């Protein structure tokens, strides 16, 4: 269960690490959720997760993208339309996705997703990190 879904660009946070099941990729209507391919230093989005067919690519900022590498997915926040499809409770099994305007900051009153195993952590860092991984 999650607290009320609110709009805003979507940010993927630490609970995705090593879960990375790509469920969010398949509900995103604009293919703005990317995986990092370290050998090519590209961030790649696919129409269907695992299809191997790239819909879009961006050059990565290697210094940022290699912090978590392919263990985490990244929303391009300038491409996200705030449609909220990926924020629905049925999508992310670990509640890792938040609207940027509702990023939990570690305070006791913060609205965490109840499926998020990292409840209590300050997630606000991930919004800037989502911007940093894209080189331009
Ligand atoms: S809010 Fe909509 S457009 Fe943005 S990442 Fe989620 S599904 Fe994609
Ligand atoms: S649905 Fe959640 S765990 Fe799966 S890839 Fe997306 S953010 Fe990561």
Image (cartoon, grey):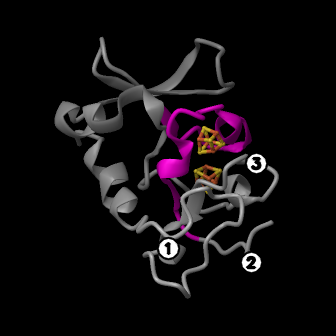
The residue carrying pointer 3 sits among few (fewer than 14), some (14 to 19) or many (20 or more) residues within 10 Å by Cα, namely: some
Q: Which residue is mark 2?
A: 4
Decide if residue 34 is in sight here. Answer: yes
Disc nearer the start of the sequence (2/1): 2
As displayed, is residue 7 above or below residue 86? below
Q: Residue 93 at x, y = what percent?
A: 73, 46
Q: Residue at x 47, y 50 (%)?
A: 14
Q: CB of residue at label 3: within 8 Å of ligand 2? A: yes
In the image shown, does 3 or 48 lie closer to the viewer?
3
The magenta segment is: 8-35
Q: Residue 91 got which mark?
A: 3
In the image shown, does 80 or 114 lie closer to the viewer?
114
The residue carrying pointer 2 sits among few (fewer than 14), some (14 to 19) or many (20 or more) residues within 10 Å by Cα, namely: few
The residue carrying pointer 1 sits among few (fewer than 14), some (14 to 19) or many (20 or more) residues within 10 Å by Cα, namely: many
Q: Which residue is mark 1?
A: 104
Q: CA distance from mark 2 to mark 3?
A: 15 Å
Quadrant of residue 24 in the image?
top right
Decide if residue 57 is in sight here. Answer: no
Disc nearer the start of the sequence (1/3): 3
Q: Is residue 73 left or right of residue 64?
A: right
Q: Is residue 65 left or right of residue 119?
A: left
């Amino acid at each position: 269960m999650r607290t009320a879904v609110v709009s805003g660009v979507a940010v993927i946070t630490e609970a995705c690490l090593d879960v990375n099941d790509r469920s969010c990729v398949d509900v995103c209507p604009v293919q703005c959720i990317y995986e990092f391919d370290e050998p090519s230093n590209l961030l790649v989005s696919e129409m269907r997760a695992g299809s191997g067919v790239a819909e879009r690519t961006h050059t990565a900022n290697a210094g940022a993208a290699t912090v978590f590498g392919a263990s985490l997915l990244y929303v391009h926040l300038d491409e996200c339309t705030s449609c909220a499809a990926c924020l629905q409770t049925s999508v992310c099994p670990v509640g890792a996705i938040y609207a940027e305007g509702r990023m939990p900051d570690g305070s006791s009153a913060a609205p965490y997703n109840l499926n998020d195993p990292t409840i209590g952590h300050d997630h606000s860092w991930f919004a800037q990190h989502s911007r940093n991984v894209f080189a331009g």
